[in-house]
Amino acid sequence: MTRVIAGSAGGRRLAVPPGTGTRPTSDRAREGLFSTWEALLGTLEGVRVADLYAGSGAVGLEALSRGAVH
């Protein structure tokens, strides 16, 4: 189980596919990634984000929760 950290869906838990084939990005790593992006861009409102290795989709869902459009 992982969770959305912030934004409109902040705190919501995400089900992870069973087995060892999917390892979602840790909460700490996503927090660092999004803190860096927000420091550089100011906000993610209207930004397009590609979650290229979307096993659980946690990075993409976090981006949408924080205002990304696609």
Image (cartoon, helix red, strand yellow):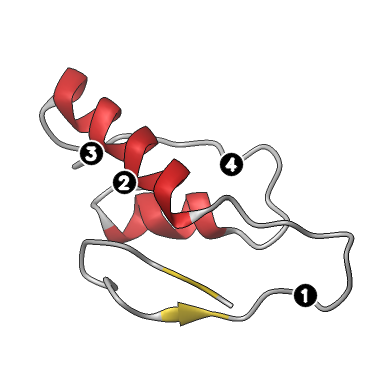
**Disc 4 crowd, CA 10 A, few/some/many (<14, 14-19, 20+):** few
Left or right: residue 24 compared with residue 49: right
Q: Nearer the viewer, mark 3 or mark 1?
A: 1
Q: Nearer the viewer, residue 2 or 47?
A: 2
Contact between labelled residues 2 and 4, with CB atoms less than 8 Å apart: no
Is tag 4's residue or tag 3's residue first in the polypeptide sequence?
3
Relative side of 51 to 42, left or right = right
**Which residue is most to the front?**
28
Q: Secondary structure at mark 4?
A: loop
Q: Alpha carbon of mark 4 to alpha carbon of mark 2: how far?
A: 12 Å
- The reply to whether dot 3 and dot 2 touch (C-beta < 8 Å) is yes
Query: Mark on residue 51?
Result: 4
Q: Percent from the top left, x then y, of residue 68? A: 31, 46
Most foreground residue, 21 or 7 = 21
Taking depth in this image into account, of 51 and 33 the one nearest to the observer is 33
Using the numbered discs, state the Cα–Cα distance from disc 3 to disc 2 in whole angstroms. 5 Å
Indicate the position of residue 8 as horizontal and vertical percent values: 21, 69
* Distance of label 4 from label 3 (alpha carbons): 14 Å
Pointer 4 with pointer 3, Cβ within 8 A: no
Of residues 60 and 46, the one nearer the viewer is 60
Q: Which mark is residue 44?
A: 3
Specify the quadrant of the image occupied by residue 62.
bottom left
In front: label 1 or label 4: 1
Residue 17, numbered circle: 1
Residue at 54% in and 36% down: 50
Q: What SS does tag 3 mark? A: loop
Q: Nearer the viewer, mark 4 or mark 2?
A: 4
| Mark sitting on residue 68 | 2
- Amino acid type indicated by mark 4: Asp
